[in-house]
Image: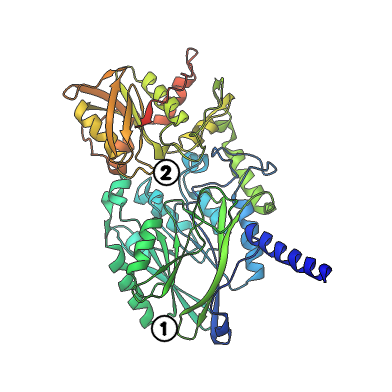
Amino acid sequence: MIRSYRKILLSVFLIVLLCLCGGIGIWHGNQQEKENVRFTLHLMHTNDLHAHLIPFNSDNRTCDYEQPACLGGFARLKTLVNQYRQHYPDMILLDAGDRFSGTVFYSLQKGENIIRLFNEMKYDAVTLGNHEFDDGLSEIEKMMTLIKSPVIVSNVIFPQDSPLAQTIMKSVIIRRGEQKIGVIGLLTDEMKTQSAFAKEIRLRPLLSSVQAETARLKNKGVSVIIVLSHIGFEADKSLANLSQDIDIIVGGHTHTLLSNNPVFPNVQGRYPTVVQNKSGQPVLIVSAGYGGEYAGQLTVEFNQNGEILSYKGDTQQINTTVPPDNVMKNEIEAVEQSLQNQLDEVVTVSPRSVLLTKNTAFCSEECQIGEVLTDTLLQAVPSAKMAFLNAGGIRAGLPKGTIRYGQLVQSYPFDSSAVIVNLTGKEIVSYLEIGLRDYIPDQRTNAFLQTAGLSYTFNPLTKKVTTVLHNGEPLHLNESYPVVMASFLARGGDGYPEQPKAQEIHSSLRQLLKQQMQRADYKFSPFENRITVH
């Protein structure tokens, strides 16, 4: 009897352990309706890959496959896709946008190799992210000549003279046996404030775009509706709540990690997160973090009316337990080799590791690399009194010891020129508070300003600046100060005002940083913690 009791306890323990480790999914739903199951959907998804072809660590620096803390990479992702597709040959593979921008591969070569390698995954559909617009419509047009997957976005109106008006669809119908699955693309309606190139497009309202496309798909006999969304987690939940016929939302944009595994860091909700729609029916929301560190796997059972009966799934971390696909790994290494001379150029030597931030996840307040980059920019432009960089443009720290150009590109991967803008003290305070509009403690805030020549304290509740000091003295609100900043900000990116009188200092801000760091008299300043929360 005791032995039998121990066996039962051991079995329960193993099941719980597997659940905690993400080894199995738990079915949610009415298991008594199993006989009513008409269709089972197997879905795998990614989002916000940001050109991370090779693995990276918690400080967003590239690293070797064998290192335990080295995660992601296209070669490992390809293995996981192959394994899932072998197990479920009818599975659907989706990506929720932002394949571009974030590493040296895009910074130095743009999208051609990224799309070529991305094609090898054989995605069934993808949507556009805001970073696909970083180099204007011309780069998206080039992408459309290369990509083999349907590209869908329902709420963007492209200029009539752009080929994108004809080549990018609002949705796609994916057939699995007799079932028709409709997938509708969505791009954030914050594009006008987040991208300096969004002036070329117009945006329809999110909800009405989805409703119109859903009605059209339903008339074509579509039984399941998936929204492939690059609008962010909170917007996904709001959309689900207001919707009528959406079954699943595959999300991106806010780098939200949803998971049932308590071991994973930075989890922001359960996988899937379930929201009731207007009719009280469940909408399943899934999202898989950032950079290809995770991939999501969801299985959903539908009845004959297209209603969700049950579901299970979770995100899987792409770590050393997932071996790299050798063909993909060799192709990526060939791309790396073509860049090696540029990447290996010595820039400077650092006496210490320069962290991305206090928790190494992203740059916000207490961002060490933010201080280093703005200090360097200010040193490079002696005519400026201050330097501003938006935190969203800073993506990695720097190592102790020799720093090479490839590591600087990882730290600041975006292509902006350096410009000087004359701002009054009052306008500077306004700039700082624009950066605080979307501030949430311990979460990424792209517009958040890193500064040199300026320190400030702010209230996280009111999102107002309480103290501003210029070189240790109070800022004079009516005085004008020359500020060097990324042209992205001066063009109106991240919601900042356009500055038509901005004066270009250098065509490449990153090259300017490199040149300053290569000077014999260059030194790393001690960390000042110049941005504080009151």
Is 110 positioned to the left or the right of 235 in the image? right
In the picture, the disc for residue 368 is none
User: 410 and 352: which one is in front?
Assistant: 352
Asked if marks 1 and 2 touch (Cβ < 8 Å), the reply is no
Quadrant in the rendering for residue 150: bottom left
Instruction: From this view, report whether residue 55 is shown above or below residue 43.
Output: above
Across and down, in percent, residue 311 comes to: 54, 72
Quickly name the residue at label 1.
221
Numbered disc in front, either 1 or 2 = 2
CA distance for labels 1 and 2: 41 Å
Going by the picture, which residue comes out furthest to the left? 478
- The count of marks equals 2
Q: Residue at x 39, y 82 (%)?
A: 220
Across and down, in percent, residue 229 comes to: 41, 61
User: 89 and 479: which one is in front?
Assistant: 479
Q: Residue at x 61, y 46 (%)?
A: 71
Q: Residue at x 19, y 29 (%)?
A: 426
Quadrant in the rendering for residue 370: top left
Instruction: For mark 1, give the secondary structure.
Output: loop
Residue 177, visible in the rendered structure: no
As shown in the figure, which amino acid type bears the numbered disc 2?
Arg
Across and down, in percent, residue 235 comes to: 35, 58
Instruction: For mark 2, give the secondary structure.
Output: loop
As shown in the figure, which amino acid type bears the numbered disc 1?
Gly
Residue 509, visible in the rendered structure: yes
Question: Dot 2, crowdedness within 10 Å: few (<14), some or many (≥20)?
Answer: some
Across and down, in percent, residue 50 comes to: 49, 48
Quickly name the residue at label 2.
444
Going by the picture, which residue comes out furthest to the top? 521
Which label's residue is closer to the chain start, 1 or 2?
1
Quadrant in the rendering for residue 312: bottom right
